[in-house]
Every structure is written in C-alpha cells, then in structure tokens.
Image: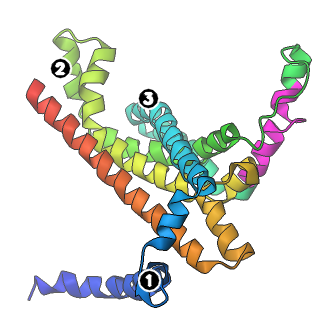
Amino acid sequence: MKRKIPYFIMLPVILLLLFFMILPLINSILPTFTVDGEFSLKAYWAFLTDSYNQKILMRTIRISLIVTVISAILGIPAAYYIAGVSKKWKSILMAMTMFPLLTNSVIRSFAWINILGKSGIVNSTFLKLGIISEPIALLYTEFAIIIGSVYLFLPTMIMTLVGVMENIEAETLEAAETLGASPFKAFYKIVLPLCVPGVIVGSILVFTGTMTAYTTPQLLGGNKNMMLATFLYQQASALGNWTSASMIALIMIVITLLVNKGMNFIASRVDRRELDNA
C-alpha cells in the first residue's frame, strides 16, 4: 500500500501534463505528417531543403551554442567564487546574480538597444575617444543577440553551478594542495570534473532558453537575423500558417533532445576518462 501512495500523489500532475501539454502538442503536430489524409514527410523535406529556412535553422543552432559556451566560460569561475565565500556574501552575490531575472525581458532588451544603438553608450564612448570615426552597426546583428542572450541566461548557468560546487568538500582541495597541486591545477583536476553534471544541466537550460527565446532575438536581431522562435511566431500570428508553426516547434523539440543526448554523452565520456586516469 505504501508503494502505491507516491503514484497516487503524482496522478494530478500527470493528468495536468497529459491534458494541457502532451495532448495539445500531439494535436498540433499530427497535421504536419499528413498530406491529403495520408502519412507523408514532404512538408518537413520541403522545409529543411529550403535555403531560407536552412539559414534560420543554422543561425539558431550557432547562436545557441555560442551563448551556451560563453555562459559556461563565464559561469564556472563566477559560481566557484560564490560557492567559496561566507553565507552573508553568498546571499548578496546570489541576489545580484538573480536580479536580471526579476526584470522583464522586454525592458532588458530595450536597455541593450540604448547601449548598442548607433546613438547608444558604446558608440558615443568610442566616438568621444576617437576610436571610431562613425557609429558601428552593433544593433540588429547576431552579435547583439548573443550579448543579450548571455546577459539573459548567464544567471541560470551560475545558479545551477553554485548548487553543485557547494557540495564539493573544501578538504578535497586542501588535500590536493598539500600533495603539491597548484590552485589552478586543483581547480582543473578536481573542481571541473566534479561540476560536470551542473555544467551539463546548465548548458541544456541555456541552449534551450536561447533557442526558444522570442523577445531578445526579435528586438536585438530584427527580421534580418531571424531565429526559429521568431520565425515560428511569424508563421503563426502574421501568416496564420499553423501547420508550418507546428512543424518548426517539433524541429525545435527534436534539436533540444539531440543536444541533451549529446551533452549527456560528453559527460559520460568525461567521467570514463577520469576513471581511466584514476
């Protein structure tokens, strides 16, 4: 009887997911596999072989990967420092890290427009210093999307890694330094392998968030640098092509699952290498 209680408690959540997420998703995706009432993949073939769609797809994957790598590079040392300070400072630093998440994404994007625009802070500063003779086109570029996305999702990476690094015993690092390892070598040999699960989870969250974000790519990238999320919105709202929008949604889900599998494979390879070197 005790074993059946957890399943009974999970039943409301399962029903909510089934009726409000899974069934609507299936209902919207099924028409993309039928042509004249018969099963067909012609719609997907036509979408994936179109050069315009290919550019949007590759741009989305490229930007999402770049944002994920930058977030990991910046997030690992930041999380390591936060995890090592006192509880008082840890609370302050975590609050500062979470602060961007408390601001609406539209407001954050408009702030970056004021920073990266031709009359923005960056161009105005460079012009005053004589570094440039005319404003640089920073806004409505892939660079602007990457900067805005890193600012948007870096806190997610840091918070994920802090939780993992807090569980690393300080005695382990002290033992490594006692045996002659430098702080950098101890960090590289001990901290990084132990925080791989956190890096994987954080990378999946950042990659998925970047790929599915709408506001930041739309406001900072414009229509010339459209990503899958903005393309999906255009197909559904502006053109009323719900079949194409559902097809894009499924492609995004498949890409996310493939990236998830790939990152888990990398994590397993890293763990196996550490065991072989032990």
Does the magenta portion include 225?
no
Q: Amino acid at mark 3?
A: Pro
Q: Residue at x 91, y 18 (%)?
A: 133
Q: Which residues are drawn in magenta?
A: 107-124
Mark 1 or 3, closer to the camera:
1
Q: Earlier in the sequence, mark 1 or mark 3?
A: 1
Q: Which residue is mark 1?
A: 30
Q: Residue at x 42, y 40 (%)?
A: 87
Report the side of 97 relative to 85 (left or right): right
Q: Quadrant of the C terminus?
A: top left
Q: Amino acid at mark 2?
A: Ala
Residue nearer the viewer, 135 or 241? 241
Taken as a whole, is the magenta stretch helix, strand or loop? helix
Q: Amino acid at mark 1?
A: Leu
Can residue 222 be seen by looking at this rendering? no
Mark 2 or 1, closer to the camera:
1
Which label belongs to residue 175? Answer: 2
